[in-house]
Amino acid sequence: MKKIVYGMLLLFVAFSTQAQDKKSKNAKYFFEVNGNCEQCQKRIQKAAFCVDGVKMASWSIETHEMTVIINEEKCSLLDVKKAIANVGHDTKEVKSKNEVYEKLHTCCQYER
């Protein structure tokens, strides 16, 4: 009887742990990205799409809101933010290097 109870408990723990580790293939996220114009929009979206696992990326010039749908089995939200920072645009979590930011066209430079 004890073996049955322990076996059931072991199965329960195994299945609940496995369910917590499951990553979404269509995770939708929203976050702010600094930028100003259509050039920024193209650059930001292109950087996001360069990350393997990004299915959709859209940045609003008016609100500065970035919307992405990613496959979390292939990438993370942090990967997307790092790619955007690498082309000169800051997020709250990841800042662009000064030398990259300074290479942006003057209309694309925002207040840091």
Image: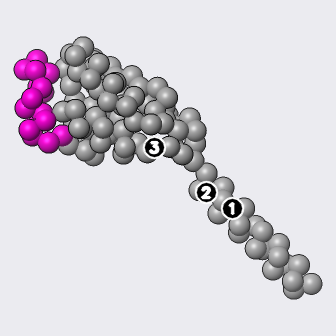
For label 2, the SS is: helix
Determine the residue positioned at 61% across, 57% down.
20
For label 1, the SS is: helix
The stretch drawn in magenta includes residue 97: yes
Residue type, label 3: Cys
Percent coordinates x, y for residue 32 in the rendering:
30, 33
Of the two numbered discs 1 and 3 on the same chain, state the one appearing first in sequence.
Answer: 1
Q: Which mark is residue 16?
A: 1
Tell me if I can see residue 73 in this picture.
yes
Q: Which residue is mark 3?
A: 75
The magenta span reads 96-112
The alpha-carbon separation of the residues under discs 3 and 2 comes to 17 Å
Q: Which residue is mark 2?
A: 20
Q: Are marks 1 and 3 in contact (CB under 8 Å)?
A: no
The local crowd at label 2, few if under 14, some if 14 to 19, many if 20 or more residues have their Cα within 10 Å, is few
- Position of residue 83 in the picture relative to residue 20 (left or right): left
The alpha-carbon separation of the residues under discs 1 and 3 comes to 23 Å
Compared to 53, does 109 lie above or below?
above
Farthest residue to the bottom: give it.
2
Percent coordinates x, y for residue 46 in the rendering:
33, 24
